[in-house]
Amino acid sequence: MKRLSTLCLSLSLVASSLCAASSVEFIGMNAPSTPEQMAKAYSEAKVIIHTPSGGKIERALSYETLFGVKDKVGTNKNPAGQLYSASMKPLMDPFGKPLIAETPDSNSLLNVDGSLYLVTHYEYDWILSDGSSVEKSTTWHNRAPMSMTLTSISQDAKSGKLKATEQYPIDFSSVGGIWIPCFGSQTPWNTHLGSEEDYDLYFTASSGKNHKAALKGLKAMSELYFEGKKEANAYDYGYITEVSVDAKGKTKVAKHYAMGRGTWEMAKVMSDSKTAFFGDDGAQVGLYMYVGDSEKNLDSGTLYAAIWKQFNEDGAKDGGQAGLSWVKLGHANSKEVAEWKNKLTFSDIFEAYAPAEFDAKKHEGFKAVKAGHSDIEYLKLKPGMEKAAAFLETRRYAAYMGATTEFNKMEGVAFNPEDKKLYIAMSYIEKGMAKDTSFEKDHIKVAKNRCGGTYEVVMHSNVKDTSGALIQSDFVPVRMYVPAPLLGEEIATDALGNTCAVDKIANTDNVFYSSKSRTLFIGEDSGTHVNNFVWAYNIDTKKLSRILSVPAGAESTGLQVVENMNGHAYIMSNAQHQADFIKTMPKELQEKVAPKIDKFQAPIGYIHGIPGL
């Protein structure tokens, strides 16, 4: 081992509490091979604690379910995944059945003055009560207003097992509800930091499919969430959210408008409690940095966007190696952004044309951008709209200012404070990241890899932005690359239907770094693995271990590592949209696995068996 971490072994393992230099090793499990294995969430992995005296403590890991989206917890009268209107009235689907989201995502297990609470996201509605696809429905809304729950958790002092004891849905009506809450993180001040992806509310310059999707999204929010009493505003969604929990289990919610608007997978705050980085999900997206004016202040600060300058050759197969520089987009506080969002529309900020409508001779002063989708838009900023554009049309304005908006499916972000590094998931390395000779601005020119990769990012202090002004943060990314073990590998379709190497990570989504185990944990959202996995990657030994498999077709979500909760460690992990099989999975195998999976259910749970770190 190159470096030792501090492991505090719990009293259940040794006669007395011991804090000493020890190291943590995960022993991986095989990929599932039978229909029975493929249909369940389970772990057959192990953890080994190597003690300073040369001994070792070995423990088997297991997956434990706290509750499912169909379950009622405590005095909650409704299932956990129930969706609600602004008046907190349970929503019904077109068949008169409860509208339940089968897609639990982010988890935050918080210890608040000795009481344990779990904040959980429900990302989107996947299927209706008759089993039909919501997204493909022609008679029902393709999206719905979403929800979060707060669950009280009890802990068995000896075994460390957790139990859900009480629950209620969190009310977001004070901020207009929430739209597609995806992954999240925990702040240094012990609150839950959530997200909103602005899919379906992202207007385009043309009247094509993206514009129509936005209109459908607004219609769903107006009719379902506001019960037809109010028209939804697209600029109310696409922000970083925060949920704080007090010792009595009461929640307070906020949207941090000063952090900008986009398809935020999540935001991760650095140890300075003021610098944050965003995962921007989708096609033609950017990498963004927020620097607060003061600690614990996510409502007044400066927003930056990155420029990728590739070091290695065009078509590089390693995911690319690049230097990063930073364009200042603007400074604002949430109060003024809230005022802009309430009175401005897209056409107030930009004059815009689609290629078919654009005439270079008639339309002077326009810039061509690709931002949020692969179509070209011709934009011209209207006078005095710089700040409004920076915070309400963050991705478009970044492209307009020359930043890189070519990343694809940028997902989770994790932080390694000891080595001053970030880890950023790129689920699919393709589309805007490949060389594009058809568009003038082409920063990223790497080989397509549909298995994706996880980038390691080096950060420095005393870095200046592109205007020469000093960035007021000690955590500014300057270099970006993919460590070889974290790059996916494409293969010919195997007998089970996998199209990426099953013993390597494919399509990274959730990431979480544990300082005390020197381990990066990675959860998959793959259209290339029949079963998705959670992996443990030791950044010193470079050992990669599979530690959890989720049901076939399901995405691994909700990743959070709790290093020590009363002498026990936990890896929080959910699964969503079970039995949403990938296309390459043989039909005969699907027919064997499908009856063993309840696709209307989805588990919220954790990996159990790890001593407190």
Image (spheres, rainbow, N blue to C red):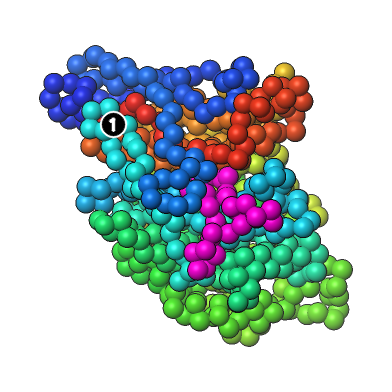
**Left or right relative to 408: residue 178:** left
Question: Which of the 4 image quarters holds residue 606?
Answer: top left
Circle 1 sits on which residue?
160
Q: Tag 1's secondary structure?
A: loop
User: Is residue 219 among the parts visible in the rendering?
Assistant: yes
Q: Is residue 164 above or below residue 529?
A: below
Question: Quick check: is 90 in the magenta stretch?
Answer: yes
Q: Is residue 108 above or below residue 353?
A: above
Pick whichever, 335 or 36, lies toward us: 36
Q: Position of residue 325 (x, y in %)?
A: 52, 57
Question: Which of the 4 image quarters holds residue 217?
Answer: bottom right
Q: Position of residue 312 (x, y in %)?
A: 62, 41
- Residue range of the region highlighted in magenta in the rendering: 80-105
Pick whichever, 129 or 221, lies toward us: 129
Q: Position of residue 548 (x, y in %)?
A: 49, 27
Question: Quick check: is 5 in the magenta stretch?
Answer: no
Q: Position of residue 289 (x, y in %)?
A: 47, 60
* Residue shown at the point (60%, 24%) measured from the top left: 38
**Left or right relative to 515: residue 338:** right
* Residue shown at the point (40%, 64%) measured from the top left: 253
**Left or right relative to 422: residue 217:** right
Question: Which of the 4 image quarters holds residue 470?
Answer: bottom left
Secondary structure mostly seen in magenta is loop
Pick whichever, 498 or 224, lies toward us: 224
User: Is residue 328 among the parts visible in the rendering?
Assistant: no
Q: Amino acid at mark 1?
A: Gly
Q: Residues within 10 Å of mark 1 (few under 14, many from 20)?
A: many
**Left or right relative to 418: residue 319:** right
